[in-house]
Image (cartoon, coloured by chain):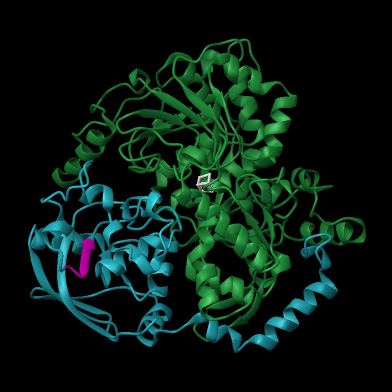
Amino acid sequence: MTGWSTHEGIAIAFDRESVDTDQLIPARFMSTPRSEGYGDFLLHDMRYDGEGRPRPEFPLNRHPEVSVLVTRRNFGSGSSREAAVYALVDFGIRAVIAPSFGDIFASNAVNNGLLPARVDADTVDALIGALGEGEMDALIDLATSTLKIGESTLPFDLDPVWREKLIEGWDDIDLTLKYRNEIASFRRTIEEEAHWRLPAGAG
Amino acid sequence: MQRTLLDKLWDAHEIHRRDDGVSLLWVDRHLVHEGSHHAFAKIAERGLPVAEPGLTFGVADHYAPTRGKPATSAIARMIDTLSKNTRQHGIECFGLDDPRRGIVHVIGPEQGLTLPGLLINCGDSHTSTHGAFGALAFGIGATEVAHVLATQTIWQTKPKSLKMTVTGDFGPGIGAKDLALHWISELGADGARGHAIEYSGPAVRGLSMEARMTLCNLSIEGGARFGMIAPDETTYSYIKGRRYAPSGADWDEAINAWRALPSDAGARYDREVTIDASEIAPVVTWGTSPEDALPVTSTVPTLEALAPKQAERFRSTLDYMGLRPGQPLEQVAIDEIFIGSCTNARIEDLRAAAAVLSGRQARVPGIVAPGSQGIKRQAEEEGLDRIFKDAGLEWVGAGCSMCVAMNGDHVEPGRRCASTTNRNFRGRQGPGARTHLMSPAMVAAAAVTGHLTDVRPLLDGRSAA
Ligand code: SF4
């Protein structure tokens, strides 16, 4: 994953609450290899009608260039499927602004360079009101944790660890392998002092 | 310093803590399923081996057919890929032909893989189920699954602690599912976000392991990171003698370690909530979020109390669900039922449903999918399968089935299903499916009458099992 520190793009409102990961990507698409791209699956059953035709009034269909979604509380709740993040990222979304996120979703997002930015419910309400059905230029600065949408600039909440990770584009596996020795000695302690923790008959 | 169960579990797994407060934790058990293919692809890309194949177990459940062969070639491929990946890395796999197979959160405990004091990860949000044993158990995404495969560790920030004390006695026919839906409706689907819940109090102590698993399973639907219950004699007697559970000297050591796990008297929590079990009625959901839950004796909410914006979203929910504001919930007619999932497909759940269905006919079709093949055999020995079949329901093989509609089992658009599962999300049981969540006894009651129904009168003169 490559890091980023600023993003200039287009914001729209997605005026829904509790958009769960089953809606972000319905389960039936999840057997697809990632290399084929997940963008078409994003919010599939809202974006397309029963015949597979795009619903013209749906926000993503009206604004296919969008990269910043402003939405309501509890975004990404539910299933841990990282495919929900793949669908957003492959569609071109770089940041989601909401009052709250599902915990697992938020951590999956950061692992894929997608910003889950928390902004309080009243501010989100005002932003959604200002955006209406239109779009506005958006500018995100991770270093200062600020967001500019149209004329208003506002701070957002982001765990400092996650901010670092988004900026540096860290790969956790590389980082963790630096602790190889500590891990091995922890493993040995379990074997010697808490053998019951290992599955019986498996070592 | 007095420590909570969470503190003790955390300390027993922390390999390293960075200056920014993030901990590197040891993972005792890693469970993978068909959906873990992204993670295996990630480690393959980097040419990394699986660090601890002996601590990793594979399970075919999400795509497992419940009747005969896999429904499509894509589904067959998902199951095949799991077999190939586990074989290649020397991981034991409870595959389609294994008589022990079942839903990952059902067979972990059943096989004795789930123990108090362990950290258990799985690329599935309902991993919180295993917390019922006093384990640190949580769902992770594919990038994290790849990380656990490669290192047997996970980076986590310690969540805040929430103590949920449940006092009083449950009424007849009311239990863990009602309790869970009740607190989620009170606190909200994100009410416990960022928290580890420890369920405690006399009403929780009185629950069986099955019921505790139901309760911890649903923690994620209230946004919690983990759900946990400190182990006690009920826990130990459930575990003893199971295939992968410790025995001999290891068992004695384990018991000693487990007895030290419960929170110290006077330990501090970040938040505390108290619930009176005697005030809980049988609960059903009416909307498309688990927080949209109410006693079955009440009505669909009305618009009056809502701000205009909220009213619009509410209308869209009711439109999807095909309900009217103010409609009595007991008048909602259903088209079918589903009894299954990692929430409510253990032997006790099947007994509770059978207690209502025994000697009665279901007015609507439906399927009963046991949580594991082991539970299936046990239910058949107890004659529960006959009760379901005689009622007109279909008795099928183990798997996630209609909980997530990945294996081909699904609810047709616009049809209404009374379901023992955990998510009433739009499209969860199939595009356009309308899901009402409730306990196994309540689903059985709905099957008998053909509409959402208070199970209590149907239990008159019967034991609730
Ligand atoms: S039964 Fe449902 S919730 Fe449980 S693991 Fe399977 S799909 Fe997930």
Toward which corner of the image does residue A196 lie, by quadrant? bottom right
What is the count of numbered marks? 0
- Direction from residue A60 to residue A162 in the image, left or right: right
- Direction from residue B464 to residue A41 in the image, left or right: left
Q: Which chain is green?
A: B
Q: Is residue B125 magenta?
A: no
Which quadrant of the rendered structure holds the C terminus of chain B?
top right
- Direction from residue B66 to residue B266 in the image, left or right: right
Residue A97 in the image: state x and y as whole percent: 25, 66
Q: Which chain is cyan?
A: A
**Which is nearer the eye, B114 or A59?**
A59
The magenta stretch is A66-70
Which quadrant of the rendered structure holds the N terminus of chain B?
bottom right
Q: Height in image: B38 above or below B323?
A: below
Toward which corner of the image does residue B11 lie, by quadrant? bottom right
Q: Height in image: B55 above or below B75?
A: below
Residue B101 appears in the rendering:
yes
